[in-house]
Image (cartoon, helix red, strand yellow):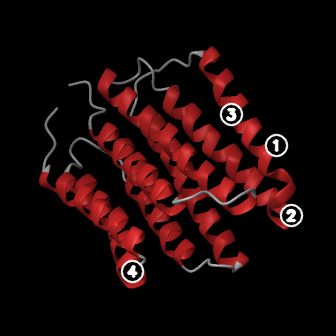
Amino acid sequence: MKTKASWLINVYLMTAAVHLVLLAAGKENGIFISKVLLMPELALLVWLNRGLVRTPLLLIALFWCWMGDVLLQFSGGQDNFFLFGLASFLLGHLFYMFTFSKLQQGGKLVWWWLVPVAAYVFFLLYTVWPGLGEMRIPVLAYAVVITLMLVFALHRYRGTTAISFSTVAAGAILFIISDSLIAWNTFHETIRYASIAIMSTYALAQYLIVQGLVWSRRD
């Protein structure tokens, strides 16, 4: 599959790698700058491949994810920033769903795939629920939306190219894993090297979703 300006993929992956190194080193200023560059780089990749991704919905999804990245950088101990960041990502997932629906033809949902998805989300919510406090309703709403995002990704089965389906589905699964790590680390118990695990899965998830959607055209 040919992607225009494929050099941007290397730039994105390099930025993500630099971000992980800065996280490990605890360089706060560099962490912020490298993180807020990630979504604009993917947005530029989408823009340059707009002949393949013939909808602005993906750019809107990336914008809200970028807003979430920015707001969560300021969330340290402040519920308002965390809540606004959560809301931004929720909007991002909604626009990902709209994009998935737009960039497919038909599609089929294999219902038994939802059994492990539902079991995993239930287990996670059951585990972190006691520590959520006043965040229970926002986190529950977010969990529902991101789960639906994965369902919409799985619904693309046979409605797009095989590589597009598998790449987007893998990205959606990684997104849930990344957010699960945030929930576990924030509301249940501290995970060693949590920030590195969260950002590595997040950066890869976003890349796979975007690249998979660029590959969605059957022709």
Query: Which labelled disc corresponds to residue 126?
Result: 1
- Taking the spot 55% from the left edge, 50% from the top edge, the residue there is 93
Nearest the viewer among 193 and 28 is 193
| Image-quadrant location for residue 117 | top right
| Kind of residue at disc 4 | Lys
Q: CA distance from mark 1 to mark 4?
A: 35 Å
Name the residue tied to disc 2.
133
Instruction: Report the side of 51 relative to 132 (left or right).
Output: left
Mark 2, Cα crowd under 10 Å, few <14 / some 14-19 / many 20+, is: few
Question: Which of pointers 1 and 4 indicates the residue nearer the eye?
Answer: 4
| Quadrant in the picture for the N terminus | top left
Compared with 124, 12 (above or below) is below
- The image's mark for residue 104 is none
Q: Position of residue 28 (x, y in %)?
A: 43, 82
The C terminus, quarter of image:
top left
Q: 148 or 102, which lies in front?
A: 148
Secondary structure beneath label 4: loop
* 4 or 2: tag closer to the N-terminus: 4
Q: CA distance from mark 3 to mark 1?
A: 10 Å
Tell me which label, 3 or 4, sits earlier in the chain: 4
Callouts 3 and 2 close, C-beta under 8 Å: no
Kind of residue sitting beneath label 1: Tyr
Total count of labels:
4
As helix, strand or loop, the secondary structure at mark 1 comes to helix
Q: Which residue is mark 4?
A: 27
Q: Position of residue 145 (x, y in %)?
A: 65, 46
Identity of the amino acid at label 2? Answer: Gly
Q: CA distance from mark 4 to mark 2?
A: 31 Å
> Quick one: label 1, few (<14), some, or many (20+) residues within 10 Å?
few
